[in-house]
Structures are given as C-alpha cells and as structure tokens.
Image (spheres, helix red, strand yellow):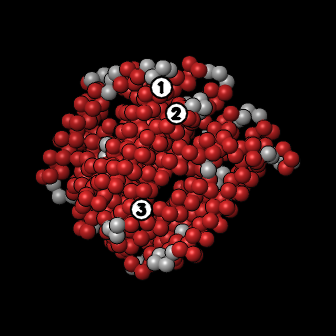
Amino acid sequence: MQVIKNYLYNAGYQILLMFAPIITTPYISRVLGPHASGINSYTNGWVTFFCLIGQLGITLYGNREVAYHRDDKFERSRVFWGIELLQLGTICLSLLAYLTVVLLFSSTFKVFYLLQTFWIIAAGLDVSWYFMGMEDFKKTVVRNTIVKLISICLIFVVVKQESDLWKYILLLGLAQVGGNITLWPYLRDSIQWVAPKYWKPFKHLYPSLILFIPTITTQVYLVVNKLMLGRIGAQDALGQFDYADKIVKLVLAIVTATGTVMLPHVANKFAKGDVKGVRQSLYNSFEFVTALAVPMMFGLMAVAKKFAPWFLGEKYVPTGTIMFIEAPVILFIAWSNVIGTQYLMPVKRVNEFTASVTAGAITNIVLNFFLIPRYTANGAAIATVIAEFAVAAVQLQCVRTTIRRRDLFRNIWRYLLPGGLMSWVVYHISEMMSMNIINLAFQAAVGIIIYVLGIIMLKAPIVDQAKQILSKGK
C-alpha cells in the first residue's frame, strides 16, 4: 500500500502540474505571444543543458543509493553528505561555464540568458532525490504544491504584456530556488551529521557519470528539437512546438509518475536479493502504464485539432496538428519508463539503458536534419515519435533474456481496441461541438465511459488489479 500511496502523492502533484498550465498557459500564450514564448523556450533550452551537465546523473544516482542504504541511518547520512557536496561542486563549475559562454558569446538574448541562471542555482540546492530514495514523497509533493500555487498567483500579478517576458523568466527561476530551499529543514530529522572525512564525494563521481550519460543523452535530443527550430529562425514555430510538447508531456507525466515511485522501491528489493519481486513489479507496472497511456494518447489525438486554438489562442492553430503527431510518444515513453527507469536502472544494467537512449538520440538528431528544414515544427514532432519508439524497441531487445516480452504485450489489444473506439467517438463529437470547458468535460466523460466499459468487457488484467487494490484498502 506504501507504493500506491507514493504513486497517488506523485500522480496528484502531476495532476496539479497539468492544471497549472490549464490556468496559466492561455493567459501567458496570449500575453507573450509565439515570438516571446519562443525566446523563453530557446534560452531555457540552453540553461537546461547546463543544469544537466552540472547535476551529472546525481538525481537518479542519489535516489538509487539512498534506497540501497535506507535502513542504515549512518550509511545513508554518509551517502547524502558525499553526494550533495559533489552536486554543489559540479553545479558551481557548470554555473561558471554558463556565465562565461553567455557573457562572451551572447548578444541578442543576453538579459534573458542571465535571468535563466536561477535554474542552475536551484539545481545545486535540490535534495528531492534523498526523499525519493526514502520513498517519502509526501514532503516533496507538499512543498512543490505550495510553491507552484504561489508562482501561479504571481504570474497573473506581474506578467501583463509581451515586454514582461523578463519578469516571467525571473519568477519561474526564483520559484524553483525557493521550492528547493524549503526541503532542507526536513533533513534534520532524517539524517545525522557525519564527519567530513567519511563523505568521500569523489567516490560517487564515476557511478554518477555512468547514469549521467543516459540522462544527458535523453535530454539532449529533447532540447535539440527546440535549438534547431531556433537556429533556423523559426521562433513562431518554436513557440507552437514548445506548447504542443509541453501539453503532451504534461499528460504523460501522470503515467511516468510510476517511474519516480518505483525506482527506489525496486532498488530496495534488488539490494535485498528479491529478484522475483523485481520481475513481478515490472510486469505489474507495465500493465498499469499501458492501461493509462492508451486512453491518454487516443484522447489527446481526438481533441487536439480544436483544443489548441481554443486553449492557446488563434495564433496556435498549427499546435493542434503538432499535438496530434506527437501524441504516440505518451505510449512509447510509458513503456521505456517502465523498462529503463523501473528495471534496468535499479538492477544496475545502466549500459543497456544508455544504449537505448543513445539510439533514440541518434535517431532524433539525424531525422531532425532532414525533417525540420522542410516541415519545421511538424518535422520535429515526427522525429520525436520515431526516436521514442526506437528507445522502447532497443530496451525490449535488451531484456529479452530476463523478461518474457510476450507476457508484456499479451493483453495490449484489450486496451488498444477500447482506446481506438473511444478516440473515434470523441473525435466525431468534437467535430460537431464548439470547444469550451463544458463541452471538453463532456467529451472527456464520454471517452472515459467508453474506455472503462471496453476494458471491463474485454476482461483486461488491470480491472482485476484495481479490484484487489480496492479490497485491500477496505
């Protein structure tokens, strides 16, 4: 039940992350417009790159290491101090490199680049990996929720026109710094002071680098889409793609919340030698994310055409097509999240995980060179879908000797058929109705009813799993 509670905490926060843009995005997209939104996306893409370099693979590595030593307070405290010192050191180096590049080579967007600096500072103060490793998701979720709600309110207060882009960037960066600082007081009751001679930060450098390779590779090809669109001067297309990508990824976040929860859970089982439990967790999680991802993918495809201009404004009509094209990544990333983040990583098969994301990165970058110049944002979306499929395909090949792949996909048709029917019905309803919040809610309700009835009639395994969870909760 602890895993379910942690998932509900994390999924609840991801739902908040979904509703936050529902509140702010229509306002920001209209106030800033596609051009200013594109500038924010472009400059944030670069600072994200330096954040990743500074963090190495510490977020994942720290999560996993704390999970391995969860039951030994001294050992987990030693691990915490060593990893955090390493993180502060690498972040300082990354910040210095970022400022050097900005001050020496940037001219057009220098002010915006400097304002994005707070994201790097926030990364150095991030200790959420410790609480995730402890499977204590309540603290991180409550903290993030409070900070998110405050930042939403401030957006409406301070961002009033396109020239307020600098205020918007500064606000988001400061919110991130403030949010990460608020977690530190909770450490007092969970760790103990350990003499610095036991910290040994450089002991964690090599294993962090090993996890850094797949992390940076994954993020690089996600950022490359935006950077290439920005470099060819398609700022409007970049703004349209960025919002489409954000909407797709926000929907996806509810599914991938399982990865954040299951990584420390599986790592702890692996540390105790429970190989059978690790494998069963994989099968259950794969079934669960498939059941969630399929309706989300089909549902987004069904409403994308009318949703985008209604939600973002008439300047974002092309975003609907981009969302439709990119929607399949919801399913592919859900699968790769289970196999990669929830299985390969906690059982220390990082090389295979790295191979899969490297294949995706190469696929994405190569396709971008051909597709973006010709199809701009649509080309970036196509490249993203094919790349994510490649990642999942390589991971499935990697686990062929330890996991029965046929068991993973045996019941997929029980989800695809109801999902496809749901999408067809909702799309035609959407075509007959104007888009507003009431009609959107009606379409969502119809879709949910069709899908749930479908998986019940087809006796999908997730139905029995849900019954078992409900019976345990009574």
| Residue situated in front as seen by the camera: 419 or 50 | 50
How far from the left and from the top, in percent, is residue 439?
22, 54
Q: Tell me if label 1 and label 2 are in contact, CB under 8 Å.
A: yes
| On screen, residue 9 above or below 16 | above
Mark 2 or mark 1, which is nearer the start of the sequence? 2
Q: Which mark is residue 399?
A: 1
Q: Is residue 292 visible?
A: yes
Q: Is residue 117 left or right of residue 235?
A: right
In what element is the residue under mark 1? loop
Label 2 is placed on what type of residue? Answer: Glu
Crowd class of label 1 (few under 14; some 14 to 19; many from 20; radius 10 Å): some
Tag 3 or tag 2, which sits nearer the N-term? 3
Q: CA distance from mark 1 to mark 2?
A: 9 Å
**Residue shown at 39% from the left, 78% from the top:** 162
Q: Which image quarter holds the N terminus?
A: top right
Task: Name the residue tied to disc 2.
Answer: 352
Of pointers 3 and 1, the one earlier in the residue sequence: 3
Residue shown at the point (47%, 72%) measured from the top left: 168
Could you say which is closer to the camera, residue 126 or residue 52?
52
Number of residues whose C-alpha sits closer than 10 Å to that of mark 3, classed few (under 14), some (14–19) or many (20 or more): some
Identified at 43% across, 65% down, the residue is 41
Counting other residues with Cα less than 10 Å from the Cα at mark 2, is it few (<14), some (14-19), or many (20 or more)? some
Residue 468 appears in the picture as rendered? no
Q: Which residue is mark 3?
A: 227
Where is residue 307 shown, x and y percent of the image?
26, 57
> Answer yes or no: do the residues labelled 2 and 3 have beta carbons within 8 Å?
no
- Residue type beneath disc 3: Leu
| Up/down of 392 relative to 304, above or below | above
Is residue 8 rendered to the left or right of residue 29?
right
Q: Secondary structure at mark 3?
A: helix
Image x and y of residue 3, in percent = 55, 33
Secondary structure found at label 2: helix
